[in-house]
Every structure is written in C-alpha cells, then in structure tokens.
Image (cartoon, rainbow, N blue to C red):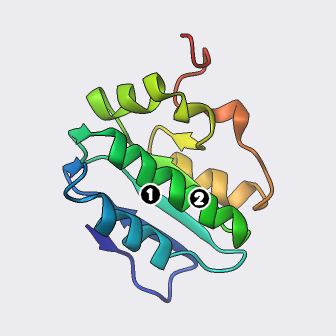
Amino acid sequence: MKRAPAETEIATIMLPERVDSVTSASVEALMVGALRPAGRVIVDGSAVTYMSAAGVRALAIALHKAAERSTRIVFCSFSGPAADCLLVSGFSQLFDVADSTEQALARLASKRAGGSGSEDRLHPHGATG
C-alpha cells in the first residue's frame, strides 16, 4: 500500500494483494487519510488478488467518508476475483469504478465531486449482469 505525494492534486492509493479482515483496517485508514474536502482520490486495485467482505466494507466506509467531505473517489483496475466480489456484493453499483488509472484520471478531471458516475460502472450491465 502506498499513497502518492501530498502535493499532487489527485491522491492515488495502491491497495495490497489481499484486502481482507487482516488488512482492511490499515487499507481503510490509508484511504480515509487521503480524503480532503472537495478533493479527488484514485484507489488502484490492480494488485488485489483477493478481497473479502471486510475489504468491501473498508471501501464502503471510505466512500461514505468521502461523501461527507465532498471528496470524489474513483476505484480502478480491479480484476478477477476482486472485481467479482464487488459485483456479487452489489457494491459495484455504489462505487465509481474505472477500468484503468488513465480512465479514473479522466473521470476526475471531467466531473465535479457531486457527479454520480453511474454510467461508468465496473460492469455496464448492472448488478444482475
């Protein structure tokens, strides 16, 4: 897990390989620590190979706290079982999920913090596929 330097306009959080009951507290703390009022954050899940319900909960808490601070947060680069976990849990409908970091950057550059991003979800077919 690492965060981009504080001086960048858009903070980037790199998630670890496993986001589960062991790592979820530190992942949550890292994400919440990056939230700034009216800020923008990318949460990169490209390294995630396993995500449990505790990991999804950590993402949901970060999303909730981001909304409280009017921070725009985009999750990106989730694949395989981690992407499936978001889909099956229904959380992919709540999160703004991009396919790549570049796509996440473009979304954050083009939309205001209040934008829902609902047209750009992980799976365009919706929760039922």
Quarter assignment of residue 14: bottom left
**In the image, farthest residue toward the bottom:** 7
Amino acid type, callout 1: Val
Q: Depth check: 127 or 75 in front? A: 127
What residue is pinned by disc 2? 73
Residue for point 56% across, 11% down: 128
Question: Mark number for residue 102?
Answer: none
Residue 36 % position (x, y): 62, 80
Q: For mark 1, does the 10 Å Cα neighbourhood hold few (<14), some (14 to 19), or many (20 or more) residues? A: many
**Element under label 1?**
strand
Q: Residues within 10 Å of mark 2 (few under 14, many from 20)?
A: many
Q: Which residue is denoted by mark 1 in the rendering? A: 43
Asked if disc 2 and disc 1 are in contact, CB closer than 8 Å, the reply is yes
- Indicate the quadrant where residue 4 lies: bottom left
Label 2, label 1: how far apart the Cα atoms are: 7 Å
Residue 43: % across, % down: 44, 57
In terms of depth relative to the viewer, which is nearer, 69 or 125? 69
- Give the percent coordinates (x, y) of residue 96: 60, 44
Query: How many numbered circles does the render carry?
Result: 2
Among numbered discs 2 and 1, the one appearing first in the sequence = 1
At which x and y percent is residue 109?
68, 60
Left or right of 24, for residue 43: right
Q: Camera-side residue: 44 or 67? A: 67
* Residue at left offset 53%, top offset 41%: 97
Disc 2 residue type?
Ile
Which residue is depicted at the point 61% across and 32% down? 93
